[in-house]
Image: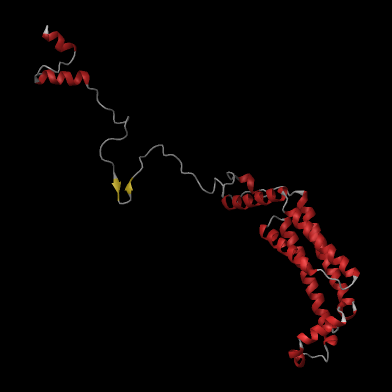
Amino acid sequence: MDDNKRAEGPDYGVRLTGDELDQHQQRYQQPVSGSEYGPQGPQPSNEYGPQMPQGNVPPVPSYQASGAYGGPQLHPEMTQEPQRPKVLNVSFWAIVAAGLSYLISQLLVVALPNRGMSDEDINMLESMMEPMQDQLPYNSMEAYINSSLMTATMIGQAVIFFVAYILVGLGIRNGWRSMRILGTVFAVLSLFNFSLASPLVAVFTAVAIILGIVGIVYAWLPASTEYYRQKAWQKAAKKIYPNAPSR
């Protein structure tokens, strides 16, 4: 009776012999598989720490391929030029027209007697420049204002500003964020450049200011901002896929 119970299961109240203990362990204890809990035994290591096991190693995600600053995943097709919205073309031509209006207003000022300055303005300017009067190559401030040197200076300055208008417009049209910020600064400063030298000069100055502001407003519309974002993604994609076609 006792032998049958001992064969069916372990009896913890009975002392087992050596052979019986071996049979009990083989029957009721299953070996633990090393693959179930990972590799067993000491792992090889070197001076840089434990090594990854050979085999199916998960790929390491690439920062560049995943996009930058929360952008989409970059792929070769993103190196192609994005479609420019029509509002940026409107912005470009408005800024160019503003620069042309400014150039015309300055040329009109050059053609005016005393450059459109009143006698009070000339007297005030003479009082301000009195300490430097001996250094000027002219007998009076009025002669200096109407000199050929002042004419060339005013025309050159007007041409330089007109070129600056065109460059800013081109930068905005091509998706340069720095030019959009610079154009915004120019639009704000143009508010202080309103001239009343003559009614015609005042008209062209006002037109230049209004067109410049319109151009900048169109450059900040949502469609324009989306185009700027796509241009930034295109620039990042070109760094990763330099051989991909951009057209």
Give 170 or 10, whichever is nearer the viewer.
10
Q: Is residue 142 visible?
A: yes
Q: Quadrant of residue 207?
A: bottom right
20 or 108: nearer the eye? 108
The image position of residue 214, as x and y in percent, is 79, 56
Percent x, y for residue 199? Answer: 90, 69
Residue 67 in picture, x, y percent from top left: 56, 47
**Quadrant position of the N terminus in the picture:** top left
Residue drawn at x 63%, y 52% is 232
Taking depth in this image into account, of 218 and 164 the one nearest to the observer is 218
Count of marks, rendered view: 0
Identify the residue at image location x=72%, y=57%.
172
Question: Residue visible at 78% across and 61% down?
Answer: 212
The spot of residue 146 in percent (x, y) is 86, 83
56 left or right, relative to 212? left
- Tell me the colour scheme of the image: secondary structure
Is residue 3 shown above or below 237? Answer: above
* Vertical order, 27 against 99 (above or below): above
Asked where in the image residue 34 lies, by quadrant, the reply is top left
Looking at this view, is 61 or 89 the one in front? 89
